[in-house]
Structure formats: structure tokens, C-alpha cells
Amino acid sequence: MKLFLDTANLQEIKEAASWGILDGVTTNPTLCARENMPFETLIKEICQVVSGPVSVECISTRAEDIVAEARKLNSLAPNLAIKIPVTLEGLKATRILSSEGIRVNMTLVFSPSQALLAAKAGAAFVSPFIGRLDDISHHGMELVEQIVTIYENYNFETEIIVASVRHPGHVVEAALIGAHIATVPFSVMEKLVKHPLTDLGIEKFLQDWKKVAAK
Ligand code: G3P
């Protein structure tokens, strides 16, 4: 399973990259707005830190505008994926861009039918937003299960990015279901390695080692 960081913060990206387990990055306009850097400079720098796919989002809403914006964004670095919200205009644009070899990440996906259409349009990635479904009392992970089944039934090559992740449990569930990727905030990435018994175990071993060293 691949792990992406869901952030536009360079420090967080550099830190997670140093752990050796970072496979890519996803951004969105909200995450980019938190950073104090010109957008294009920021994206280029992120793409230099991470060799895997870096998703950046189009803000145009008409197909022809989305295509033009996506082509321009894609020229910024060789490892970009272009996020496009799953609308009819977005699907039209995705079909054109995917036929040009531009990787599209269809985003704001909340239903299995949207995911089916994204795959049919040739999207390289599809991003179901799990936490936002949980927030309105749905079971977000059921959507991931449905998408995995649909994609397996028809051998779609579109990779599923479990997005809007709130806690490590989401990552584990996504892995058990067989999603290809989870994109997680930095705070969740840190929590993935934590366990109180590991910390207590290290403390005890270090104390006992002092007795061994004193002999
Ligand atoms: O980047 C897309 C998605 O992961 C956003 O998550 O926390 O704003 O629902 P969130």
C-alpha cells in the first residue's frame, strides 16, 4: 500500500520523506492557502522533494478551461497529477487529458457511481473522501469497499486514494480493504508508528541494559 501525505507544507513533506516511507503528496486549494509561498514556486519545490506523484487541483469548472489549466499545471514538473472534481465537465476534461498522458486524480468523490465514471474517463487516481462522509454520519469506508469491488470486477487500472483521513484506523481499514493508497495529514502519519507498549518496552530495555553494562 502506498502512503501519500495530504499537505502543502514543505517542512512536513521533507520530514516525512526522511522517514523513507513517503510515496507521494496530495494538495488542494485549502491546503495551499495555508502556505506563505507563491503557488507555482511551492508546487515546484514539493515536486523536487518527492519523486512520487504530487496532486495539484484545478479550479476551473468548464471542460475547456479545466483542460487548459491542467496542461499548464502539468508543465510545472514531471511528477504531477492533476486533481479535477468529479462533475460532467470534469469527466469531459479527464477523457481529453488522460488521452494526452496527463495523470488525472478525480476528487471530491462521494459515491460509487462517481468512481465508476472516473475510471471510465481514464482517471489515473480516484479520491473518495472518507472523513467527510463519516462527518455526516455515513460510513465512509463502505464507499471504499464498493469502489474496490467495482474496479476489481472490470479490471480498471485507476488507483484508489483514500482521502479525508482522520485517524490511523482509517489507514488500517483502507489497507485491509485493499485500497491502493491512503493520503494522510502529517499528524496521522506520525501516529501510525506510535504505540504506548513500544515506548514502555524501550524504556524497560534501556533500564535493564544499564544493569548489563554495569557487570
Ligand atoms: O485533500 C483532500 C482531502 O484529503 C481533504 O480532507 O480533511 O479536508 O476532509 P479533509
Image: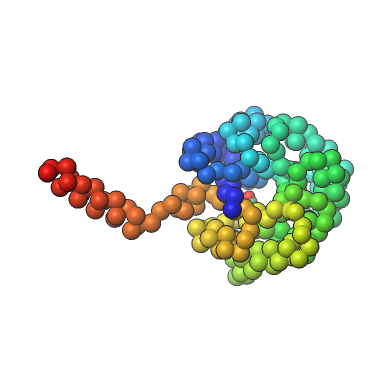
Q: Quadrant of residue 178?
A: bottom right
Instruction: Specify whether 121 is left or right of 208.
Output: right
Viewer-closest of 198 and 170: 198
* Residue at image coords 74%, 53%: 158
Q: Quadrant of residue 45?
A: top right
Q: Position of residue 115 (x, y in %)?
A: 75, 60
Instruction: Specify whether 126 is left or right of 211.
Output: right
Q: Position of residue 176 (x, y in %)?
A: 57, 63
Image quarter of the C terminus? top left
Viewer-closest of 83 and 4: 4
* Residue at image coords 85%, 44%: 99
Tell me, yes or no, if residue 152 can be seen here. Answer: yes
* Residue at image coords 59%, 47%: 4
Viewer-closest of 154 and 63: 154
Q: Position of residue 185 (x, y in %)?
A: 54, 49
Q: Quadrant of residue 109?
A: bottom right
Instruction: Specify whether 208 is left or right of 87.
Output: left
Tell me, yes or no, if residue 133 can be seen here. Answer: no
Residue 41 vs 187, above or below: the answer is: above
Q: Position of residue 36 (x, y in %)?
A: 57, 33
Residue placed farthest to the front in the image?
215
* Residue at image coords 17%, 42%: 213
